[in-house]
Amino acid sequence: MRKSGEMIGIYVAIGATLSLLATFSLGFGDVLATLAVLQVIPTLFFASRSRRLPSGMLHSVGLSMACFAVAYLDRQWFTYQGIGLVTTNMLILSGFVSAATGLWLLLRTRRSTDARAVLGDSIIIGLGTWLVGWVTFVQPAIEQGAAPIVVAVLGGLIFATSSVVLFLMAVVLLGERRANPGSWLLALGVVTSVASTIVRSLEIAGYIDDSLRAASTALLTLALIAVAGSVLVVTVVKPSIRPVSAIHRVPSATRQLAQLVLTIASLVFPVVVLAASGPNDLRDRVVRSLSALVLTGAVIVRVLESARTNSSAHAELLRRAQTDPLTDLPNRMVLLERISSYLHEAWRPDRQPTLYFVDLDRFK
């Protein structure tokens, strides 16, 4: 199995090297991307046969890889405008949604992670990123006629969803006590796929010309190769490498601090952007207002949920501290507190506290 791990590492290294070379040649990049698309089929076949990944996560990863692969083929085979452009954007959006679902399912398998809290933070980050994306490039692209309304809106949704994927991937990596090759390859695939999408979106919006199309294709190729390598590491190299979905127990302070910083940043940036620029027309004003309203509602719900969770955790800790784990009856600490209270009340004329001792033989 160690030899299989080395072969997978060499495969990913060769793919990364060829992807770097493909940035200088669009024709070579297209051939390499096509090969990367074709590798999706055997990768998913081996993953399904090994049954090392949970079915939900396997389906999410497979759907995500398939969506990105079909999006590339759609861009190559059909005219990259009109309906073809809308279809490609919908496929990319579906790929990121599937990736986010798979990462959240992965976090649910880890007992040290509060999946509901992570979901709430993901929604807040996605809404904040959507608001920033609308102000910075979606609305300008629509106003300048650089892209149709549907394409521009889909681009904004892709931008927001990709930020959620990056956040979830960061939470996964922060939950690692030791370096896990499967997780880091998955992170490489996530980062390069987001970078490829950003380059492609900037090209559509007219901010850059098509000279970087080869770079976008090379990044997509590297993303497919890295994700395939991550899946193969988990499903093939079983004895030597822990699976990505293994349960980890790490100090939660670092992870919680990172989540807090990212969530606060997703709230501060939209406020700064909204304060720095005013709405251009009625449509812009309506979208900004609705987005800010939904973001505020999400933050309120998240705060209330956090308060409820903290209150429940405090009550549970108090119950465990005051009860015996075997009988669930009040323990010695509660007994001493009650005796002390009754002794203080015994000086009152209307109080006559009584203490009974019950001794059970062979009860431990």
Image: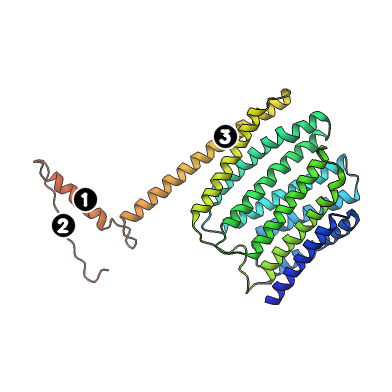
* Crowd tier of the residue under label 1, counting other residues whose Cα lies within 10 Å: few below 14, some 14–19, many 20 or above: few
Task: Report the residue at 67% width, 57% height from top.
Answer: 187
Tell me the residue that label 3 is attached to: 297
Q: Which mark is drawn over residue 118?
A: none
Q: Are marks 2 and 3 in contact (CB under 8 Å)?
A: no
Q: Amino acid at mark 3?
A: Gly
Check disc 2 and give the amino acid type. Tyr
From the image, which quarter does the C terminus lie in? bottom left
Q: Residues within 10 Å of mark 3 (few under 14, many from 20)?
A: few
Cα–Cα span, label 2 and label 3: 55 Å
| Lower sequence index among marks 3 and 1 | 3
* Rendered image quadrant of residue 297: top right
Q: What residue would you read off at disc 1?
A: 338
Q: Work out how far the residue at label 2 is from the one at label 1, CA to CA, in angstroms.
A: 13 Å
Secondary structure beneath label 2:
loop
The amino acid beneath tag 1 is Arg
Mark 2 or mark 1, which has the lower sequence index?
1
Question: In the drawing, what numbered circle is on residue 356?
Answer: 2
Residue 83 in view here: yes
Instruction: Write the residue at 63% across / 70% down.
Output: 241
Q: Quadrant of residue 351?
A: top left
Residue 238 is left or right of residue 355, and the answer is right
